Amino acid sequence: MQASEDDIREDLLLRGSPFRRLFESRLVGQVASNAMLYALLILLVEDGSSLQATAFVIALTLPSVILGIPGGTVADIVPRRLTMLGSYLARAAIAGALVYYGGNLIYIYLLVMAHSTIGQVFGPAEAAVVPAVVRRDRLPAANALMTLGLMVGQIAGMVVLAPVLIKLLSPDAVFVMCALLFLVAAWIVLLARRFTAPVDDSVPAMGFIDATKHGFEIVRTDRRAYLAIVYLVISLALSKVLIILLPEYTRSVLDIEPEDAVYVALPAAIGAALALLVVPLMSRLLGAWRVAALGFVLLLLGLFGLGFVVYLRDFILENWDIGIGFVEDEVGVSSVITVTMLLAVPLGFAFTLVGVASRVVLNEQAPPEAQGRVFSVQMAIGDLLTLVPLLLIGAAADIFGVRTTLITATAVATILSAYLTFGRRFGSGRRSPETESPVVAT
C-alpha cells in the first residue's frame, strides 16, 4: 500500500504531477477572483465611505457563517475534482453576470454572496487535495507553493490586471477577463489525472451528520489543530480588517488614492516571497506549530506598527539615520509612506508564515477523509466570531479614525489570542504521537 501511495504522491511537485495541475488552477483562479473582487471594491468605495467596504466584506463572510460547516462536509463526500470543476464554471457565470448587473448595488452584493457561497465547498476541497497528492514530508513545500499561487494571484489580479483594465477600458472588461480565466482554471482541473489519495477500505463511510460531528471532534480534541485554527482564524480576521480599512488608510494616513495601494501591496509581496523560501526549512527545524506562533506574533507587531506609523516615523527620524528623510526630500515619497512600505515587508512575511504553517499542521493532524471538514470548521468559526466586529469596523473608522480603529482591533486580537493559547480548557484531548503538545502541556 505504501509503495502505491508514494507512486501517486509524486516527489517532483511541479513536474507533471496532480499537484502541478492543482497549483496551476489555483494560480489562474486566484488571479480571476482577486481581480473581480478588487474591481468591485473600487466601485463600491468611490464615495469615500468605509461602510460600503464593510458591506462588501460582510457579503463575502455571511455565507461562511451559514454554510461553512455543511460545505466542508460536502467537500469530503463529493469527488474533489468534480467540486473544483463545478465551482470554477459557476464563478465564470458570476463574472459574466457582473457585466450586466455591475451597476446595481443589490445585484453586486447578491453575486458577491454567491461567489462566497461557492467558496464554502471549493475552499475545503482545494485544501484537502494537497495531502491527498503530496507525501507528508513534502507538505511544507507544497503548502508554500499553494500560498505562492495565492500571493501571485493577488498581485496579478489586484495590482496589475484589474487596475490596468479599469483605467484603459472599464470594470466590465475586468469581469469579462475574469470569466475567461475561470474557464481556463476549469480546463486545467479537467486535465488532472486525479485529486484523491488511495481509498482505505478499513475506514467506514460516514453520513452527513456524523461527518460534520467528526470535524468538530478533531478540532476540539487535538491541541495542534486547535492552535493552528486559532492563529489562522485571527490572522484572517485581521486581514479582513485591513481590507476594510485600507482605502481610508491610504487616503487619510498615506495621502494617496486607494488605486495606489501598490505602495503597500508590493512590499508585502516581497515579504511573502521571502517567507515562502524559508518556511519549509523553518517547519522542519522548529515544527510547523512553532512557525505559525512566531508568524502570528510578528503579524500583531506589524499591525501595531501600521497603527502607530506616524509616531514610529517621528521616532526613526529623531534617533536613526536610515535615509527616510532623504527619500522624502529627493525622491518625493512621503516619509510616512516609506515607513509603511518598510512595515509591509515583515507583515507579508508574517502573514505567510501563519498561513502556510497553520495549514501544514491541519494537514498533518487531520485524517485524509476529514480534511475538508477540518478546514471548513476553521473558516466557519472564524467568520462567525468576526461577523459582528466587522460590521462595526467601517463605522468605527469613520467616527474614531482609521489608525485608532486598527490599533484597537489589533489589541483585542492580541488579548483574545493570548487567552485562547494559554487557556487549558481549550483544545484539550489527544496529543500528537510524534512530539509533545505545543505551547502548553495538556
Image (cartoon, rainbow, N blue to C red):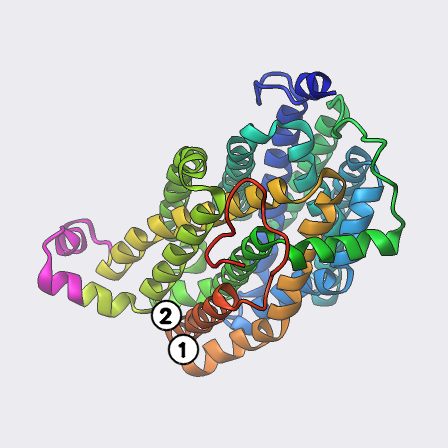
Q: Which quadrant would the C terminus be assigned to in this image?
A: bottom right
User: What is the crowding at mark 1: few (fewer than 14 residues within 10 Å), some, or many (at least 20)?
Assistant: some
| Residue shown at 44% from the left, 37% from the top | 276
- Report the magenta residues as a range: 315-333
Q: Which amino acid does label 2 sit on?
A: Ser
The image shows residue 225, relative to residue 273, as above or below, that is below
- Magenta stretch, main secondary structure, is helix
Q: Is mark 1 on a helix, strand or loop?
A: loop
| Residue shown at 76% from the left, 57% from the top | 69
| Residue closer to the observer: 100 or 426 | 426
Tag 2–tag 1 contact (CB < 8 Å): yes
- Left or right of 317? Residue 393 is right
- Left or right of 144? Residue 132 is right
Q: Which quadrant would the N terminus be assigned to in this image?
A: top right
Name the residue beneath numbered marker 2.
252
Q: Which amino acid does label 1 sit on?
A: Gly
Q: What element carries label 2?
A: helix
Q: Residue 263: within the magenta?
A: no
- Extreme residue toward the bottom, this view: 399
- Residue 194 percent coordinates (x, y): 76, 25
The image shows residue 219, relative to residue 201, as above or below, that is below
Name the residue beneath numbered marker 1.
401
| Residue closer to the observer: 15 or 400 | 15
